[in-house]
Image: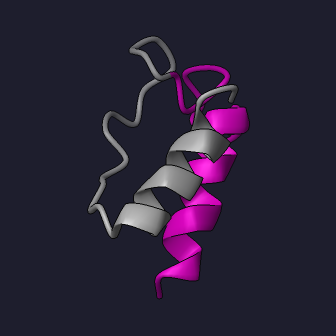
């Protein structure tokens, strides 16, 4: 995810809220590699890991 890490750094610095948008394999930003929804893309992994940090 080329925009994910810079966005994360910016959002955390500014205290901006965010959400992982669509859990889909076709809609941008794509979060899964295919329709099985078992394998995240780089962006999907970033979103999952970032959400896990907030637990």
User: For this rendering, which residue is in front, 4 or 20?
Assistant: 4
Examine the rendered structure and indicate whether residue 12 appears above or below residue 32.
below
Image quadrant where residue 42 sits: top right
Tell me if 53 is positioned left or right of 42 in this view: left
* Residue 47 drawn in magenta: yes
Relative to 30, is 13 above or below?
Answer: below
- The quarter of the rendered structure image containing the N terminus is top right
Q: Residue at x 61, y 42 (%)?
A: 6
Name the outermost residue toward the top: 26
- List x then y, in percent, for residue 51: 49, 68
- Where residue 37 sits, quadrant-wise, is top right
Q: Based on the displayed image, in which of its 4 quarters is residue 44 positioned?
A: top right
* Placement of 31 over or under 9, stated as above or below: above
Check if residue 51 falls in the magenta segment. yes
Where residue 21 sits: x, y (%)? Answer: 31, 39
Residue at the image point whose x is 62% and y is 36% from the top: 43
Chosen colour scheme? one colour
* On screen, residue 44 above or below 26: below
Camera-nearest residue between 1 and 38? 1
Residue 18 left/right relative to 8: left
Q: Which residues are magenta?
A: 30-55
**Left or right, 2 with reference to 11:** right
């Amino acid at each position: 995810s080329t925009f994910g890490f810079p966005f994360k750094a910016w959002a955390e610095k500014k205290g901006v809220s965010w959400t992982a948008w669509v859990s889909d394999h076709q809609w941008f930003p794509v979060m899964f590699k295919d329709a099985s929804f078992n394998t995240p893309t780089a962006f999907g992994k970033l979103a999952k890991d970032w959400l896990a940090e907030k637990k």
